[in-house]
Image (cartoon, rainbow, N blue to C red):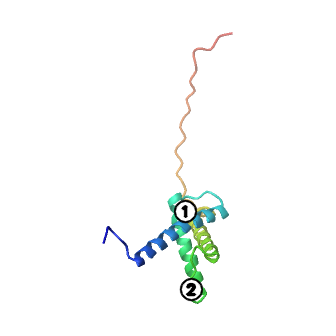
Amino acid sequence: MDGWELTEQTQLWFNDVLVWIGYGTLIGLLAKAIMPGRDPGGPVATLGMGIAGVIIGCGAWTFLSQGERVTPISGRGMFAGTAGALLILFFYRLLSGYWYEEPAVIDPPRRRRRPARRRRYHLADYYDEP
């Protein structure tokens, strides 16, 4: 054995992980392009949203199609992943307050007014006399 070698199963696993990360990034960018606007997240949030969207979308498609395996590389996988990422982006914006503002308190507490202060008028002694 010359050097360090991985088993075929481990190589396939690493390949799948890299494919999901790569396509998850593309799916996250595609979802943000379809639903434009300011997002509180940066590039790491886009990556996470894309990967989670691919997992949710492809997983839901696989579950609903009675076991047909859907990968993000296929056309169905791109569609399902984009739909999953859009769903995550929608809820992300909804929970961050992008579309929703909390209503004001109906009966705000009354503030006690300070007693009025006497105003002092300062006369300047530099006026020119006519």
- Where 107 sits versus 114, above or below? below
Residue 100 showing in the rendered view: no
Measured from the top left, where is residue 128 in percent x and y?
64, 11
Return the x and y of residue 49 as percentages of the image width and height.
54, 67
Q: Residue at x 61, y 61 (%)?
A: 98
Callout 1, which amino acid?
Thr
* Distance of label 2 from label 1 (alpha carbons): 25 Å
Q: Which image quadrant for residue 76? A: bottom right
Q: What residue is disc 2 on?
A: 63
Residue 66 screen position, x and y as percent: 58, 90
11 relative to 96, above or below? below
Instruction: Check the picture and name the quadrant holding the N terminus.
Output: bottom left
Q: Is residue 43 above or below residue 83?
A: above
Q: Secondary structure at mark 2?
A: helix
Q: Position of residue 85 (x, y in %)?
A: 59, 70
Q: Earlier in the sequence, mark 2 or mark 1?
A: 1
Q: Does residue 81 appear anywhere in the picture?
A: yes
**Residue sitting farthest toward the bottom:** 66
**Residue at image point 31% right, 69% down:** 2
Quadrant of the image containing the C terminus: top right
Given residues 25 and 84, the one toward you in this image is 25
Q: Amino acid at mark 2?
A: Phe
Count of marks, rendered view: 2
Name the residue carrying label 1.
46
Q: Looking at the image, which residue is at 52% across and 51% down?
A: 112
**Of residues 15 and 75, which is closer to you in this image?**
15
The residue closer to the viewer here, 88 or 115, is 88
Q: Residue furthest front?
A: 2
Nearest to the observer: residue 8 or residue 73: 8
